[in-house]
Amino acid sequence: MDRLDELHIFTAILDAGSLNGAARKLRRSAPAVTRALAALEERVGLRLVERTTRKLAPTQAGMRLAEMARRVLADYEAALREEEGASLRGMLRITAPHVFGRRHVTPAIIDFLDQHPELQVELVFNDRNIDLIEHGIDLAVRIGTLGDTSMVARQVGEVRRVLVASPAYLAAHGEPLTPAALERHDVIFNAGLAPQPEWRFRDGAREVVVRLTPRLSVNEIDAILMALLAGRGIGRPLSYQVAEQLETGALVRLLRSYEPAPLPVQLLVPSARHMAPRVRACFDFLAARLGGLDVIAREP
């Protein structure tokens, strides 16, 4: 096996924390990854990782080698580029929420591929925040606060949770003027977002919690939109999910003064150090493209 390849596999093992995780990230078999680690340890003459039943951890020798390996691999990547503006090559794996990915990430990536004909991109749409290392993801688009993370994030926009209903529903049932009035309305609830059927609103500096008895609970946004457009109740999608319907008047935005704070749209990568040029280029391209989408948080 190529010795640079051994170093690449070794750093992938440490990043993933397991042999199986590294195998998934590198799209290789677990036995091949195990053999590569064994060969490297034999070549070095030292144990590089401590193996437990749940996770791998580097030894002191492993940490020293990993630091040097990352420098070597970064220098090798730079040497391949040779000159500024050299063609980008290789595979990029990107994840994003389903609707946002279809409507905003896909068109951007199509244009990005037009600029870099030697690149390949795999888009993985998932409304759950999947583990980037475990699934071999290079870049993620995330909506909402991230919590504690050691990864690198850049906010590129924001969206809101908006209360909406069809004109037909409002003609038949009237328009709620306060959050408390929702208790008398048919509610379509996204069961995939929260364990409890409730909506939180903002009344000045005060948070208002409305307990719901949904007429319909669904865990998929397209089904929720179908029910909303059919006039079956009031729902609360994200603003980008109903931007077109709000613009055409197919849906009406309600209780705007009570809307909670906007949610950030962020780009996320596992690490800024030794970021592959193709990942950096895509990161910057998406930041520029998605940064123009703040208007979807302020639909009329």
Image (spheres, rainbow, N blue to C red):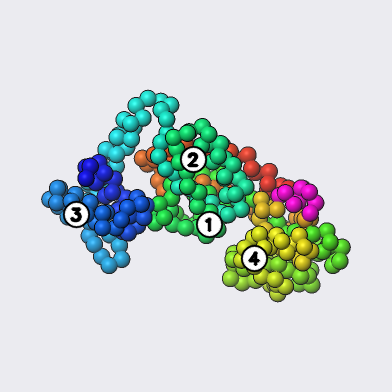
- Position of the N terminus, as image quadrant, is top left
Provide the residue designation for mark 1: 126
Q: Horizontally, is 75 left or right of 291 in the view?
A: left
Gap between marks 4 and 1 measured at Cα: 16 Å
SS of the residue under disc 4: strand
Q: Is residue 263 above or below residue 200?
A: above
Q: Which stretch did the figure color magenta?
A: 243-250
Is residue 158 or residue 20 the one in the foreground? 20
Amino acid, disc 3: Ala
Could you say where residue 88 lies in the image, as x and y percent from the top left? 42, 33
Provide the residue designation for mark 3: 38
- Residue 249 on the magenta segment: yes
Earlier-in-chain disc, 4 versus 1: 1
Foreground label between 3 and 2: 3
Amino acid, disc 4: Asn
Residue extending furthest toward the right: 171
Q: Horizontally, is 164 left or right of 87 in the view?
A: right
Earlier-in-chain disc, 3 versus 2: 3
Could you say where residue 42 lies in the image, as x and y percent from the top left? 14, 51
Provide the residue designation for mark 2: 283
Earlier-in-chain disc, 1 versus 3: 3
Task: Identify the residue shown where x is 30% and y is 34%.
Answer: 75
SS of the residue under disc 1: loop
Amino acid, disc 2: Phe
Quick check: can you spot residue 83?
Answer: yes
Amino acid, disc 1: Asn
Q: Which mark is residue 139?
A: none
Gap between marks 3 and 2 measured at Cα: 35 Å
